[in-house]
């Protein structure tokens, strides 16, 4: 765990630089021959920024000799295949369609309408029958953060 904590500290310090404004660390994973860093940003996180951070971190790791064996360093944005983890990521994705997996096994899909400190609100369109007519209605579902297992952004084609 020492390696991950050290790398996180280094990155958090580096990401205070103006050229990395809004960029933050989401996850750090270490396997025997690989170190994966997942970043996100309040704005745009492009390949160039990830590459700059990767080169800087690779050099810093080499100087500190924290990983004596051969390893692969991957620095990338979180991407759509990774769940939202941080409050900041939820805020960034307000207005997008999401699928929320709850700890009780329930899946809720809809639009991420609002994000508060301790909950999110998902807006869903449903069709109900009223007097033999189909009526489209919008319902809002409040989900406490403590009930969320994982949340993914949905891509509509």
Image: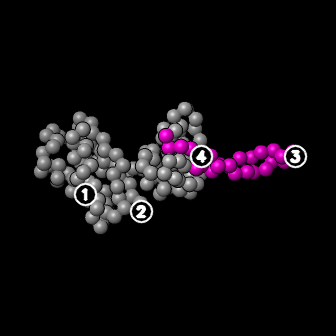
**Residue sitting at x 24%, y 51%:** 9
In the image, residue 81 sits, relative to residue 47, either above or below, namely above
- Residue placed at 48% from the left, 56% from the top? 91
Pointer 1: what residue? Answer: 13
- In percent of width and height, residue 108 lies at 59, 41
The span shown in magenta is: 121-146
Residue ID for mark 3: 131
| Residue 69 left/right relative to 139 | left
Which badge, 4 or 2, comes first in the chain's sequence? 2
Marker disc for residue 43:
2
- As for residue 119 lying within the magenta part, the answer is no
Q: Is residue 50 left or right of residue 60?
A: right
147 lies left or right of 10: right
In this rendering, the answer to whether 22 lies above or below 118 is below
Of mark 1 and mark 2, the one earlier in the sequence is 1
Callouts 4 and 2 close, C-beta under 8 Å: no
Between the residue at mark 1 and the residue at mark 4, the CA separation in whole angstroms equals: 36 Å
Counting from the top left corner in percent of width and height, residue 56 is at 21, 56
Give me the residue at 23% from left, 53% from top.
10
Name the N-terminal-most of marks 1 and 4.
1
Q: Residue furthest bottom?
A: 18
Mark 4, residue position: 142
Real-space CA distance between mark 1 and mark 2, rounded to the nearest whole angstrom: 19 Å
Q: Do the CB atoms of the residues marked 1 and 2 lie less than 8 Å apart?
A: no
């Amino acid at each position: 765990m020492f390696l991950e904590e050290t790398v996180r500290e280094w990155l958090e310090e580096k990401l205070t630089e103006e050229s990395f404004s809004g960029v933050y660390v989401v996850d750090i994973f270490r396997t025997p021959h690989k170190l994966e860093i997942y970043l996100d940003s309040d704005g745009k996180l492009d390949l160039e920024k990830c590459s700059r951070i990767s080169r800087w971190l690779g050099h810093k790791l080499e100087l500190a000799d924290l990983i004596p064996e051969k390893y692969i360093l991957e620095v990338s944005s979180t991407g759509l295949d990774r769940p939202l983890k941080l409050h900041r990521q939820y805020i960034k994705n307000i207005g997008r369609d999401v699928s929320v997996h709850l700890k009780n096994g329930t899946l809720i899909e809809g639009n991420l309408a609002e994000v508060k400190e301790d909950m999110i609100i998902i807006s869903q369109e449903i069709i109900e029958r009223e007097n033999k007519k189909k009526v489209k209605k919008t319902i809002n579902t409040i989900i406490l953060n403590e009930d969320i297992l994982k949340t993914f952004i949905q891509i509509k084609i």
